[in-house]
Image (spheres, rainbow, N blue to C red):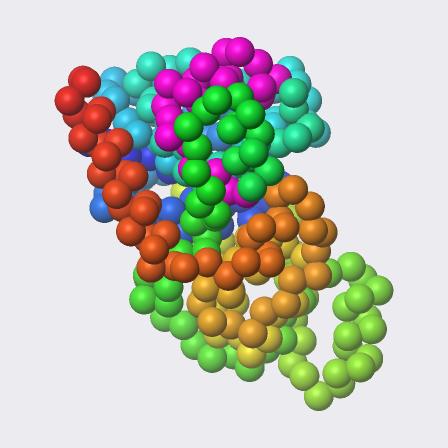
Amino acid sequence: MKLAILGYSTVNIGDDMQSLITSYLLPNIDYIIERDNYDNIYDYETGNKIEKLNEKVILIMNCWLIHGPNYSINNIKFPIKNENIIPLYISTHISPKVNELLSDKCINDYIRNSPFYTRDMWTYNLLKSKNVECYYFGCMTQLVRKEYIKQNIDKNDLTILVECDTDYNEKYNNENPTEKIKIVTHFPLGLNKLGPKERMNEIEKLLVLYAGANKIITTRLHCFLPCRALGINVTYIGPIDARTNDLVNNTPNTEELLKIFNRVLNDKIVKCTQSH
């Protein structure tokens, strides 16, 4: 069965962290499909865009569902209309800001492709109230291990401040003059001009940098979660809300989640193979 991960055209490279770590956990990857436009499909190996998808593919929906630029409802391209793309809802969050995601059409899609494995309890409770079969799972970025990372990891003795505000950075620098401090952004200039495969290459470089650090302080969920999984000394100082609360405040049973993911994926493959 062909498998696909999500790609992005956003200005936030943290989005791509989700897809990178998903890629580590899959037995094979054939395509990258853009989250905000499911008509944009890329060959995984070459990174080249393809004109038409001519075969069935399971798409791992490890994402924040779903918004276009500036949360514009006009950019919502959901549920997926391409019948060759079969969504596997796992580590999926439904945005509270987009009521259209609770339309009858969307709810029917969640039910048709259930069970739905949610990223957070907010999404879980929401879907339960709509009679969707669902389970709380968490985020796949929590499942990364150092042995999955293909590049060499070198100890860099850095304290890395990721997307902390300017005042925080300045205060931290002043209070810790002996530390080697590096400031990192998840919103690098020109990111949205890169193709999805190029973006994944860039986020892997960043993950390697994080993996060699002494300490990381961040406001970004998709810095905090993989760094915690890698055993790095990481502190989250970002917002606590419906999307982040369960993930930040609960340390997952990684081994159990890996078993669940493999079982869910295998069940989906078997079901799709039998029905197609």
Q: Return the residue nearer the eye: 233 or 46.
A: 233
Quarter of the N terminus within the rendering: top left
Inspect the magenta stretch and tell me whether residue 114 lies in it: yes
State which quadrant residue 6 falls in. Answer: top left
Q: Is residue 75 visible?
A: yes
The residue at the point 21 percent across, 26 percent down is 271
68 over 108 or under it: above or below? below
The residue at the point 42 percent across, 13 percent down is 81
Q: Is residue 198 visible?
A: no
205 over 16 or under it: above or below? below
99 over 141 or under it: above or below? above
Q: Return the residue nearer the eye: 192 or 247.
A: 247
Q: Residue furthest bottom?
A: 178
x and y, in percent, of residue 18 in the image: 47, 47
Q: Return the residue nearer the eye: 67 or 47.
A: 67
x and y, in percent, of residue 35 in the image: 49, 30
The residue at the point 54 percent across, 58 percent down is 250
Inspect the magenta stretch and tell me whether residue 1 lies in it: no
Q: Which residues are magenta?
A: 100-120
x and y, in percent, of residue 36 in the image: 53, 27
